[in-house]
Amino acid sequence: MLTQTKQLLQSTGLLDKLSASELLTEKLGEKLEKYIITALANSIPDDKAAELEEKINDDDPKLAEYLKSNVPDYESILQTAVDNFVADAEKTL
């Protein structure tokens, strides 16, 4: 799980709602990453897709800076993805 994903899970309050095992936390993180990566992949210019994939795979600590520079409306895309994830997760909790 990316470092940023765990921070997002904590900031949404989902981790506080669970007496989650490490495995459950990992699974939630993987699902959140899928939401975010899908949203970003649909928004990033095609010529930047490979570079984004590399940064994600390398857990690049400067990923947020890269996204702010290369993805139009990065923060609103991220917020929408997180909001959608939280809404879906809360339906099952």
Image: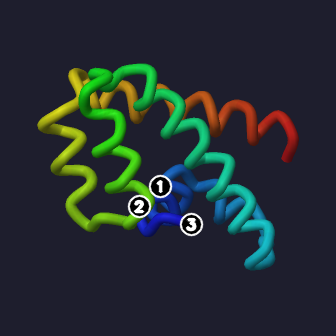
> Quick one: label 3 or label 1, which is nearer the N terminus?
3
74 on left or right of 81: left
17 on left or right of 55: right
Q: Residues within 10 Å of mark 2 (few under 14, many from 20)?
A: some
83 on left or right of 77: right
Amino acid at dot 2: Gln
Q: Residues within 10 Å of mark 1 (few under 14, many from 20)?
A: some
Q: Position of residue 20 (x, y in %)?
A: 78, 71
Q: Position of residue 74 (x, y in %)?
A: 28, 31
Q: Position of residue 59 (x, y in %)?
A: 38, 66
Q: CA distance from mark 2 to mark 1?
A: 6 Å
Question: Can you say whether 7 is above or below 46 in the image?
Answer: below
Q: Position of residue 7 (x, y in %)?
A: 45, 63
Q: Which residue is mark 2?
A: 4
Q: Please say if the residues under marks 2 and 1 sit with CB atoms less than 8 Å apart.
A: yes
Amino acid at dot 1: Leu
Q: Which residue is mark 1?
A: 8
Picture residue at 43% right of the left edge, 68% below the top: 3
